[in-house]
Image: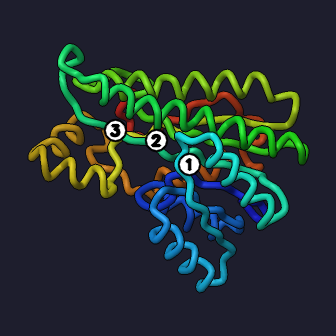
Amino acid sequence: MLENKVVLITGASSGIGAAAAYVFAREGASVVLAARREERIAALAAELNDKGFKASAVVCDVTRAEDARRAVAHATERFGRLDGAFNNAGIGGDQAPLHEMGDEVYDTIMDINVRGLWNCLRAEIGAMLATGGGAVVNNSSVGGLVAIPTAAPYVASKHAVVGFTRAAADEYARQGIRVNAVAPGLTRSEITTDWFARNPGIEDAINEATPQGRTAAPEEIAEAAAWLLSDRSSYVTGTVLPVDGGYVNR
């Protein structure tokens, strides 16, 4: 599905991003792994290369526009162009009633989830326009489609991801660039495993509210992103695809 495509993955050091690196590589893509944790992405790139795939790593803090530009430049210099991008970097943040939230929580979430996406989209779209088009998938959340109690800044940031997705899809469709988003439900990762440990019973409660009754594996989200990045979804743009076990369909 991604044969001979060059795909940049942000937030690639763990969770959905690391799973996407394997899924995309198995589909035939040359993958560029971007994240802040240099040792993690370097080790993952080495593992992929040892298995016969094509991978490269670049340190990137998406909140810094120069880092986003450098990651895209790394992809084009290493593999010749940029065909796709999975903008996966993001955080959840602490949960509390809105009126008790501190400015630092809001600022951190918005800086990573919204400004980070803004920085990446500008760099990625510029590179894709130079080579005739491409595909972008942004990682939103069910929190970008419905409310989540005690998570107002996170919900607002993930709604912003949806807004960026739809705006960019409309703006660049005639120039050969498709922009879509996935909206994952509860997905197992380092972050959620720690969250489960700090909040006993929370996973069971969310799964009880999910029609499929379970937590997703990160590979399941990555598979959906792979389809949206591939030519098999060539007539799909501006779409936000829930990958949530039916959570938002309750």
Residue that carries the numbered disc 1 in the rendered image:
224
Q: Residue farthest to the top?
A: 99
Distance from label 1 to label 3 (Cα)? 21 Å
Element type at mark 3: loop
Under circle 1, the secondary element is helix
Q: Amino acid at mark 3?
A: Gly
Relative to 46, say whether 164 is above or below.
Answer: above
Which residue is located at x 16 percent, y 38 percent?
205
Q: Percent from the top left, x then y, of residue 132?
A: 90, 44
Mark 1 neighbour class, 10 Å CA radius: few under 14, some 14 to 19, many 20 or more: some
Q: Earlier in the sequence, mark 2 or mark 1?
A: 1
The image shows residue 144 at horizontal and vertical percentages of 44, 26
Q: Which residue is mark 2?
A: 243
Q: Between marks 2 and 1, how big is the CA–CA gap? A: 7 Å
Q: Which amino acid type corresponds to the residue marked 2 in the rendered image?
A: Val
Q: How many marks?
A: 3
Q: How is the image coloured?
A: rainbow
Q: Nearer the viewer, mark 1 or mark 3?
A: 3
Dot 3 corresponds to which residue? 92
Which picture quadrant has residue 22?
bottom right
In front of the other: 119 or 50:
119
Within 10 angstroms of label 2, few (less than 14), some, or many (20 or more) residues? many
Q: Are marks 2 and 1 in contact (CB under 8 Å)?
A: yes
Local SS, label 2: strand
Residues marked 1 and 3 touching at CB (< 8 Å): no
Q: Earlier in the sequence, mark 3 or mark 2?
A: 3
**Which residue is rendered at x = 62% and y = 42% of the image?**
137
Which residue is painted at 87% across and 28% down in the image?
Answer: 174
Graded by Cα atoms within 10 Å as few (under 14), some (14 to 19) or many (20 or more), the crowding at tag 3 reads some
Disc 1 marks a residue whose amino acid type is: Ala
Look at 24% across and 35% down and name the residue there: 94
